[in-house]
Image: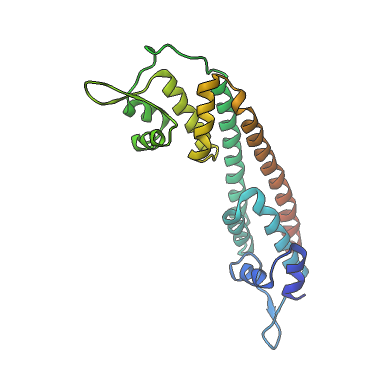
């Protein structure tokens, strides 16, 4: 089997196939007397497994999984897969936390919930510099104490900071979060974020399905190696 035969199935270039072999994603190929690579059905299984793993686990992790399998460290590969599933579970919990946060967006009286940058950063598990960056991006709008100049975060500011924190954990960029929080402020409800949450849920579901597909192809490759 030639490099082009492997490449054609997945719409890859022959150079990509050679690069995958050099990176340890594919097992080492035999060489002809003239130095040309020759591949076997085992290499086809390996490439199918890698291509299937990428959508669910990402390119770097999929690469590490295949490298571990090809050096005979299957348990290491399985641990990497477990880590990815754990991250997906964390992301699902993050989404649930965002949904829970959005269910409690009723305005809170100004005099309740005031705090300063240090305590708020500590509560969220982030650095004060991160809150200042979010302020510059328009995610939070603390007022300034007229005497000390310190930032003072109201209950509504704390809500916005919590929401920004959850959305950042969900993979959203600051420029994507700012208009969402602005809509929440003006609407005072969940409606502006409903479509975003549906898209987020759809992405998580797609990742989960992709992980299943990757697992099936990887299992086929492992079985082929055992034979």
- Residue displayed at 43% across by 33% down: 138
The spot of residue 70 in percent (x, y) is 63, 64
In the rendered view, tell whether residue 125 sits above or below residue 9. above
Q: Is residue 36 left or right of residue 89?
A: right
Closer to the camera, 183 or 67?
Answer: 183
- Residue displayed at 36% across by 25% down: 142
Q: Is residue 116 left or right of residue 161?
A: left
- Residue displayed at 74% across by 62% down: 10
Q: In which quarter of the view is residue 21 placed?
A: bottom right
User: Can the viewer see residue 117?
Assistant: yes
Q: Is residue 62 left or right of residue 129?
A: right
Q: Residue furthest front?
A: 186
Q: Residue furthest bottom?
A: 34
Closer to the camera, 13 or 21?
Answer: 13
The spot of residue 93 in percent (x, y) is 58, 31
Quadrant of the drawing holding the C terminus: bottom right
Closer to the camera, 203 or 60?
Answer: 203
User: Can the viewer see residue 39?
Assistant: no
Quadrant of the drawing holding the N terminus: bottom right
In the rendered view, tell whether residue 205 sits above or below residue 151. below
The spot of residue 72 in percent (x, y) is 62, 62
In the rendered view, tell whether residue 45 sits above or below residue 126. below
Q: Residue furthest left?
A: 147
Q: How many marks?
A: 0
**Colour scheme used in the picture?**
rainbow
The spot of residue 213 in percent (x, y) is 73, 49
Q: In which quarter of the view is residue 207 placed?
A: top right
């Amino acid at each position: 089997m030639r490099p082009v035969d492997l490449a054609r199935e997945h719409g890859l270039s022959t150079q990509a196939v050679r690069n995958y072999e050099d990176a340890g994603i594919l097992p080492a190929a035999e060489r002809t007397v003239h130095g040309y690579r020759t591949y076997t059905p085992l290499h086809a299984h390996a490439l199918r497994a890698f291509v299937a793993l990428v959508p669910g686990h990402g390119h770097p992790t999929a690469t590490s999984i295949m490298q571990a399998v090809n050096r005979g460290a299957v348990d290491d590969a399985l641990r990497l897969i477990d880590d990815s599933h754990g991250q997906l579970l964390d992301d699902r919990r993050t989404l649930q936390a965002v949904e829970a946060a959005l269910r409690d967006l009723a305005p809170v009286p100004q005099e309740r919930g005031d705090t300063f940058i240090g305590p708020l950063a500590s509560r969220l598990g982030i650095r004060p510099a991160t809150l200042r960056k979010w302020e510059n991006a328009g995610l939070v709008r603390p007022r300034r104490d007229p005497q000390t100049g310190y930032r003072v975060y109201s209950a509504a500011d704390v809500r916005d900071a919590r929401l920004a924190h959850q959305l950042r954990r969900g993979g959203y960029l600051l420029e994507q979060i700012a208009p969402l929080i602005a809509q929440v402020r003006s609407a005072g409800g969940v409606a502006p974020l409903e479509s975003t949450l549906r898209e987020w849920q759809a992405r998580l579901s797609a990742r989960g399905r992709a992980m299943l597909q990757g697992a099936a192809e990887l299992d086929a490759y492992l079985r082929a190696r055992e034979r």
